[in-house]
Image (tube, rainbow, N blue to C red):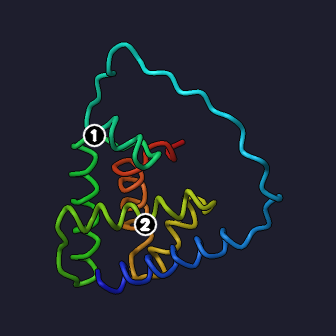
Amino acid sequence: MNRTLSAAIAATAAALTLAGCSSSPEPTTPSTVTVTAAATAPTTTPATVATEATGRTPGQPVQERLFLRALNAANANMGDAPVDKARALDFGASMCNALDAGASTFDANQILVEGGMTPTDAGKVAATGIAAVCSEHLP
């Protein structure tokens, strides 16, 4: 698992670095924004807060459990130790960062295969990870 996580995080960092190298137009003059206070505060849920903070659409708790199960099954097949939920979700976030930067779901899957997972395990881990952490990338 440590090999896979290290490889995936390194690949994600490389993808994000390359995405940052693209040329962008000159900055424009900021426009004036008028802010008005709402009469009542909107109700928020933890999912709403997470979505607003990260721009992501998190999955349901059952999807997180499926991702953790798929990731730990892949680790067992590679002879690596299981990981806890927090580390698994961090790993899922690194996949989502790569997708946000323009990588495809195939690219995410390929990184996992190159890290030592079987294509079947990589497909399960990539699909469940995307569903758990950034479901906006699901087809």
Q: Secondary structure at mark 2?
A: helix
Q: Quadrant of the N terminus?
A: bottom left
Residue at left 51%, top 73%? Answer: 12
The secondary structure type at the circle numbered 1 is loop
Q: Assess disc 1: are there few (<14), some (14-19) or many (≥20) residues with their C-alpha within 10 Å of its C-alpha.
A: few
**Quadrant of the image containing the C terminus:** top right
The mark nearer the N terminus, 1 or 2, is: 1
- Is 67 on the left or on the right of 97, as rendered? left
Asked if 49 appears above or below 28 in the picture, the reply is above
Instruction: Please tell me whether mark 1 or mark 2 is closer to you in this view.
Output: 2
Residue drawn where x is 49% and y is 66% of the image: 109
Residue type at mark 1: give it. Gln
The label number, if any, that marks residue 32 in the structure image: none
**Do residues under tags 1 and 2 come within 8 Å of each other at their CB atoms?**
no
- Single out the residue that lies furthest toward the right: 25
In-image side of 130 versus 17 (left or right): left
The kind of residue tagged 2 is Ser
Image spot of residue 137 (x, y percent): 51, 47
Residue under label 1:
60
Quadrant in which residue 94 is drawn = bottom left
- Residue bearing the label numbered 2: 94
State how far apart marks 1 and 2 are (Cα): 18 Å
Q: Is residue 13 left or right of residue 18?
A: left
